[in-house]
Amino acid sequence: MDVIECILERSRVENFSQKEVNDRLVERMLELATHAPSAGNVQAWHFIVVKDAKVKERLFEAALRVASIKSAPIAIVVCADMERMGLRYGEKGKQVYAIQDTAHASLTLALVAHALGLGCDMIRAFDEADVASILELPPHLKPTMILAIGHPAELPARASKIPFENITWLNRYGNRYEVRGKRIFV
């Protein structure tokens, strides 16, 4: 599957079959996530793979009861290493670059999961302190994303997107970027 196809086809999966996810697929996703863009190539991220049903139940509670966490065979919690990024870039590293970098790694995980025939739900709303406590994270690690991953129980509907020409400007805000010709991808 090429990257364009992967981007266009990937959609949020909320319902998973109970079929286990092969460890080799998980390892492939994690290996490729480490190739995500990173400020200064610091790679200030950590990945916690959660398979234990009791731990997933606690994450479910910390994440506003998002059902996909319990139904997915695995959850991967992406954490920013604030200390490592701060050593290189100070406060801006902690407040901006660490978060951006874990977002890149999270999206890479989601795209690779899709390319491997898996589904993913990217969960951003959760109680950080609860997640940190559940996973026994040291203080310098900040959880930034929970990805529920597994084999989709059904094919998800493709979400509609705002046409790029409605949110794109040329040289300055308000100067509409004019679309030249037909849209290539629909």
Image (cartoon, rainbow, N blue to C red):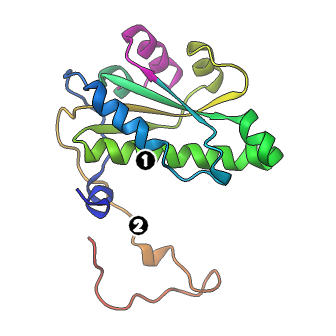
In the picture, measured across the screen, residue 142 lies left or right of residue 119, that is: right
- Label 1 sits on residue: 108
User: For residue 162, which numbered disc appears in the image?
Assistant: 2
**Counting residues from the N terminus, which is met first, the one under dot 1 or under dot 2?**
1
Q: Quadrant of the C terminus?
A: bottom left
Residues packed near mark 2 inside 10 Å, few (<14), some (14 to 19) or many (20 plus): few
Q: Amino acid at mark 1?
A: Thr
- State yes or no: residue 161 in magenta: no
- The x, y position of residue 79, in whole percent, is 58, 32
Residues packed near mark 1 inside 10 Å, few (<14), some (14 to 19) or many (20 plus): many
Question: In terms of depth relative to the viewer, which is nearer, 107 or 71?
Answer: 107
> Which secondary structure lies at badge 1?
helix
In the picture, measured across the screen, residue 149 lies left or right of residue 176, that is: left
| Residue 158, above or below 172 | above
Residue farthest along the top direction in this orientation: 54
Q: Provide the residue span drawn in magenta.
A: 49-67
